[in-house]
Image: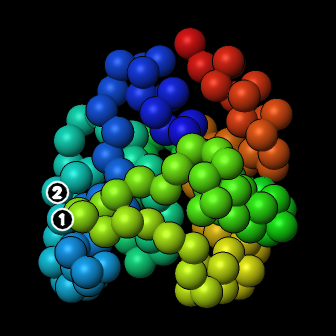
């Protein structure tokens, strides 16, 4: 993944929100506990966080110095998820003993993802942070190569 490559390049550990949020049986972490966990995660000096989790962007965006948003076409996202689910690409990983699988809920999240809202949030930080909006895999690779 991009996060793995970025972490290796910058010699930083990656914080995978999916691995922290999901409990056995795909049970979510309760909201207040989740927000407390995320506050603790971003209290460190240097970090790379992988994951969206809209309900904690208000905690993560202010202390971040760089924000990278993957603004991919919905159909490209769906294609990639289906390929992983069928084992043609990197396989879905295990999270807390839960095998990741293709679900209607995941498909729905991809289709209804509020891109305009996210782009508006990024605009708020345009002058204060490094913001990268990448639209395709080529731009992802170019960004990775441009990072020292």
The local crowd at label 2, few if under 14, some if 14 to 19, many if 20 or more residues have their Cα within 10 Å, is few
Q: In which quarter of the image is residue 59?
A: bottom left
Lateral position of residue 42 relative to residue 1, left or right: left
Q: Is residue 126 above or below residue 20?
A: above
Q: Which residue is drawn at 16% across and 78% down?
A: 33
Q: Residue at x 42, y 21 (%)?
A: 8
Residue on which the image places disc 1: 37
Q: Residue at x 31, y 61 (%)?
A: 95
Q: In which quarter of the image is residue 112?
A: bottom right
Q: Residue at x 74, y 67 (%)?
A: 78
Residue closest to the eye, 31 or 59:
31
Lateral position of residue 9 relative to residue 105, left or right: left
Q: How far apart are marks 2 and 1 (CA)?
A: 5 Å
Where is residue 102 shown, x and y percent of the image?
A: 57, 73
The dot on residue 28 is: none
Lateral position of residue 98 relative to residue 23, left or right: right
- Can you say which quadrant of the picture contains the N terminus? top right
- Can you say which quadrant of the picture contains the C terminus? top right
Lateral position of residue 111 relative to residue 3, left or right: right
Indicate the secondary structure of the residue bearing disc 2. helix
Where is residue 20 shown, x and y percent of the image?
A: 25, 62
Residue closest to the eye, 28 or 148:
28
Query: Is residue 38 visible to the viewer in this orientation of the structure?
Result: no
The dot on residue 40 is: 2
**Mark 2 in CB contact with mark 1 (< 8 angstroms):** yes
Query: Is residue 105 visible to the viewer in this orientation of the structure?
Result: yes
Q: In this view, does 87 lie above or below 22?
A: above
Where is residue 137 shown, x and y percent of the image?
A: 77, 40
Q: Is residue 93 above or below residue 52?
A: above
Q: Quadrant of residue 132?
A: top right
Indicate the secondary structure of the residue bearing disc 1. helix
């Amino acid at each position: 993944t991009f996060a793995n490559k970025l972490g290796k390049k910058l010699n930083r550990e990656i914080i995978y929100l999916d691995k922290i949020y999901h409990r056995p049986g795909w049970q979510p972490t309760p909201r207040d506990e989740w927000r407390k966990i995320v506050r603790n995660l971003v209290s460190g000096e240097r970090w790379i966080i992988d994951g969206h989790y809209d309900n904690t962007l208000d905690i993560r965006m202010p202390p971040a110095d760089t924000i990278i948003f993957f603004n991919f076409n919905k159909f490209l996202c769906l294609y990639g998820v289906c390929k992983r689910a069928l084992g043609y690409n990197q396989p879905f990983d295990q999270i807390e003993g839960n095998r990741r699988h293709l679900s209607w809920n995941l498909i729905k999240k991809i289709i209804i993802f509020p891109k305009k809202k996210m782009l508006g949030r990024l605009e708020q930080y345009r002058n204060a942070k490094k913001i990268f909006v990448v639209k395709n895999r080529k731009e992802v690779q170019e960004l990775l190569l441009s990072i020292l």
